[in-house]
Image (tube, helix red, strand yellow):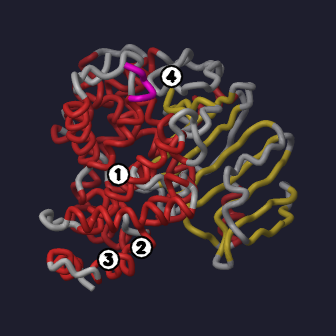
Amino acid sequence: MDKKIDAARLLRAMSDVDDKYIEEAMETAAPAKRATVTSLRRYSGIIGIVAAAAILILVGGTIMNYMGRSKSASEEIHAHNQSIEGVVAEIDSATDDNSQGAVSGGSGECVGAPTTAAEPEVEDAYLYSRDSLTCEYMCFAFESLDALEGSAQFDFEAPDSVDGSSDCYYFNYVYDDGFNIAEIQYLDEDGNLICTIRKAQGERNISDCDTCYSVGRRVDVDGIGTVNLSGSIRGYAVAYWIHGGYSYSVTTEQLLTEDAILDLVSQVS
Amino acid sequence: MEDQLIIDMYFARDEQAIACTRDKYGRLLRSIAYGILKSHEDSEECENDTYLKTWSVIPPTRPTAFQAFLAKITRNLSLDRYDQMHAAKRGAGEVPLMIEELEECIADQGATATDDETEDEELKRILNKFLETLPTDARKIFMRRYFFGDSVNEIAERFGFGKSKVKMSLARSRDSLSVLLKKEGYNG
């Protein structure tokens, strides 16, 4: 059967999903956030446990699977959360596929897009995903900043945590032309993204958000040079600068004061 | 006006029901159609076709979630129109992108279901099962992308998320769906 027809049918079948999911997706940001706060208060303990276990399983299980560690370790992680056992099995299966195809393709194959990005030269990298839209790069995840630096092949200094964060993800986006971006994502205890800090060689704007905001400002910072800030009249969410042959960006999910975002900038090199 | 009152008007064959539906949901329906068709003219025609279709199926149908009921009709009519418009060539807009992205979920071997109706029912069951397993934010993002046809930018703006979070969430969800489809024996 033609693959294209299947994807089109899958898209068409989305029309038949339960009404509750359609109505849920019609909610806008404000009510959704209120609902989240309410449910978090009520179930904060359970959510914390499940989130911690899920992150542990996702990161730990995947890395260990890739490195060929013993099955018992994986089973030990699985035992942390019986309630998501089915999901765990699926995730393990997916990461197995990804590990096998880390260089040549993996499960997230991009039709009609280049698939020749170089594998990072560290052993514990695993293919995390590809660019959702253009498939221009492959994204590899790491369990530490050291491993990320090894992959990106440059030093990357950044804060261990930011205000409200409890976890970090380390990613290396490797483009087909060899260009690579090192990225640290800071997440809160519920897994929500708080802040993203990036570094890459060269002078490309790597903030991925240069047209997101209407208000822009340039600030001269001692020891760094000009920092480009973007945001709204209520604050800034993007900082982008070039220094010493590298480009950097800080992107926050919430608007910050100028002083607060520049404080983050000062911690990155 | 409450949905049940509007539905009662359909049952009473009161043509004012269509005007009330348009007043309350016209904008939503046009946005769904526009997300797929990227044409204001075609979107308006799909919106009007939605009212006609609704008029023809109520009664006997009494939808429990009127908004979702209308959204599904508009979406299907828009996809039908899209297929007609692009029968021979791949068109512009979000639909080809959505199809391309969803191809990631399906292996080369293709589906094993024996006929269209069986396969559609099976896909519906799998999709509902898949959506049930997703975290709320990820589910909303997935639905906005693949039901409503919103772009990544539109989703990020709607929910106040960063674009990178939206992209990452979609990639993770597609991976999960791919795994589920395999597990369900849907492909090789």
- In this view, the mark in front (1 or 4): 1
SS for dot 2: helix
> Which comes before the other along the chain, label 1 or label 3?
3
- In this rendering, the answer to whether A259 lies above or below A76 is below
Q: CA distance from mark 2 to mark 3?
A: 10 Å
The N terminus of chain A appears in which quarter of the rendering? top left
Packing grade of label 2 (10 A; few <14, some 14-19, many >=20) is some
In this figure, which residue is indicated by the disc labeled 1?
B139
Q: Amino acid at mark 2?
A: Gly
Three-letter residue code for mark 3: Ile
Residue placed under numbered mark 2 in the picture: B26
Check disc 3 and report the residue beneath it. Answer: B18
Q: Which residues are magenta?
A: A1-5
Q: Could you tell me residue A192's position as x and y percent?
A: 44, 55
The residue that appears at 41% across and 47% down in the rendered structure is B80
Residue under disc 2 on the same chain as residue under disc 4: no
Write down the chain letter for disc 4.
A
* Front residue of this view, candidates B75 and B176: B75
Please identify, in this view, whether the residue under mark 3 or under mark 4 is nearer the observer. 3
Residue at left offset 72%, top offset 70%: A214
Residue matched to label 4 = A124
Measure the alpha-carbon separation of dots 1 and 3.
31 Å
The reply to whether discs 2 and 3 touch (Cβ–Cβ < 8 Å) is no
